[in-house]
Amino acid sequence: MHTYKRILKYFTSFWKPLILAIIFTFLFSILNGASVYLSIPLLDTLFQQEETASNSALIKKDNTQSWLPDFVTETVKSVSNTFHEFIFTGETEEILIRISVLILLAFLGKAVFGYLQDYYLSYVQQGVIKKIRDDAYAHLHKLPMSYFKNERTGDLISRITNDVNLVQNSFSVVFASIFREPVSLLVFMIIAISISWKLFLVSLVVVPFSGGLIGWIGIKLRTQTTMLQQQMGDITAVLQESISGVKIVKAFGMENYENNKFIGFTAKYFKTTLKKIRTQNIASPTTEFISVIVGVVIIYYGGILVLVDQSMKASEFLGFLFAVFQMIPPLKTLATVNNKVQESIAAGDRVFELIDTVPTIKNVENPINIDSFNDKIEFRNVKFKYDDSNEDVLEDISVTAKKGEIIALVGGSGAGKTTFVDLIPRFFDPTGGNIFIDGHNTKDVSIESLRKLMGIVTQETVLFNESVKRNIAYGLEDCSIDKVIEVAKIANAHNFIQEMPNGYETMIGEHGTKLSGGQRQRLSIARALLKNPPIMIFDEATSALDNESEMLVQEAIERLMTDRTTFVIAHRLSTIRNANVILVLDKGKIVQKGRHEELLNDENGLYKKLYELQFRSLE
């Protein structure tokens, strides 16, 4: 129940509407009971069996003294006598008018308070679920890059959507039941006990049988629900992967393979769903059948009290039956509460597993805030390896990058170039050694202030399904269109933007699918230019540009590099030639370091080989 208690803690933020919901629930239940109770005087009047208030009191002394305190008995009798005096005073027609008006008022109040209780209960329910989903999404952004390398995107989406939806659906039923059904049950229970406590005891036979059945079903449902949510995560992951990679699927003619894979996952989900439905559907009919057995016994025993013992009036017996049968719907609803609790716990476990994941990249207590970069960035004996790897991606890296310098990184695939630059903004933390910025260990600097100093253009262009303007000005509020146009011109993007249907207000589609690769990259460069940071990181930023666009963008990048520290993962030779320092990486180690001309003179060096294999053809 730990998970359920965590869900309940969210209610503290909505205590005002919760109190109103509880008040309206009580009023609804009382009027609901009153509408049933009024059937007794109505039947008495219709069948000409009304008695004086003294001998028709609802609570009879011989039935109550044995189990109720005297003051309770006297209070209830006094209220009952007053009510009967009011009802049965006057002619039959006047009595019928009073009863009819009271029934009308009871149902009117019941309708009004029913609407209000439903509204405020829904307000609290939806508010709690919204807060859980918001917390899960916000926490997702706190998690380090290493977490996303180990988790499937589709499964994470499933947790925040499908799992939270199941918590919502299950919890909505439970929440309404917890506040509404017990009150209704209590009201009708009081009415039933007041009429005949002996007859009421007979109806309690259903409790132990139903309780055992509900407990067994709840355990099975929790296991099946957990399995279902995991399988839905698999389905979402396959769906996300196939949609994002649809071009490759079509290019390799793998449609049937992907279809069969998807069908396999949905078949497992289908089988598990049927098992869950079978389990769910056992509770209600079984409980209902047990209730019918008890109802038959009540009818038989009550008939004896009315016809043989004559200790109960027929109208009271019918009123008792009305009250007992009004107790059955709340009982049936409460019988399913445990099942819903188990479902919401199973889904909640997956949501809270995400929320409880401790970020490995986080601020220390009282971090240092820096708002400028003035001197240098130092790597001191830096090592790094991923959590699931035994081999170092980077090993014993010691480098100093002074302000205004251009640091280029070259090397073969898997040499550790991207990992190197990812350590600077703390997408990852070194597993050995430290990185310093202006003498401060980056682990002691607040993540927010550190990343504000950096502009990053990645090899994999990331754009959002928003307008061109909002993509370029991403993260900058109230940015003027003039500044956006200025950086777009520098990035050689202005011309093609103007040709788009709505110019800078054109929506570019998910991941910028309406743009070419070169256009997407130029928007990404414009975004970095607009931020205008003192430190720039280019991870093969010009790789998607044609020669003409690259020439223009390269000029802009070189102007941007002035008086800035720039880290460049090289793709084209022009940047390499202008770099102050070129770092040649191989298997996570710096095997060469120097300027372009110096490294070319080393006949046996790796840089010379890379140059001859790759760069010379690009000159």
Image: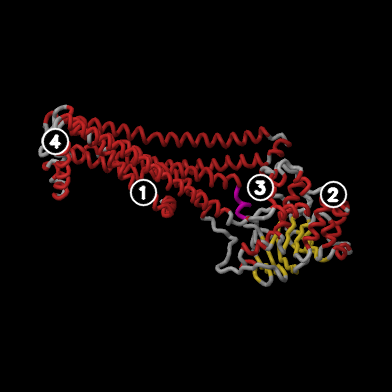
In this picture, is 161 found above or below 447?
above
Q: Which residue is mark 2?
A: 548
Q: CA distance from mark 4 to mark 1?
A: 37 Å
Which residue position holds label 4?
Answer: 89
The image quadrant that residue 372 belongs to is bottom right
Q: Which residues are magenta?
A: 146-152
Q: Position of residue 566 (x, y in %)?
A: 75, 62
Q: Let me know if residue 148 is in the magenta part.
A: yes
Q: How many marks?
A: 4
Compared with residue 379, is residue 334 higher up or lower down, i.e. above or below? above
Whole-angstrom CA distance, mark 4 to mark 3, is 76 Å
Q: Residue at x 16, y 38 (%)?
A: 84
- Determine the CA span between mark 2 and mark 1: 68 Å
Which of the labelled discs sits on residue 496, or is there none? none
Looking at the picture, which amino acid does disc 4 mark? Answer: Thr
Q: Which mark is residue 20?
A: 1
Where in the figure is residue 544, as x and y percent of width and height?
78, 48
Residue 248, image x, y percentages: 71, 39
Applied colour scheme: secondary structure
Cα–Cα gap, marks 3 and 2 = 26 Å
How far apart marks 1 and 3 lie (CA) works out to 42 Å
For label 3, the residue is 464
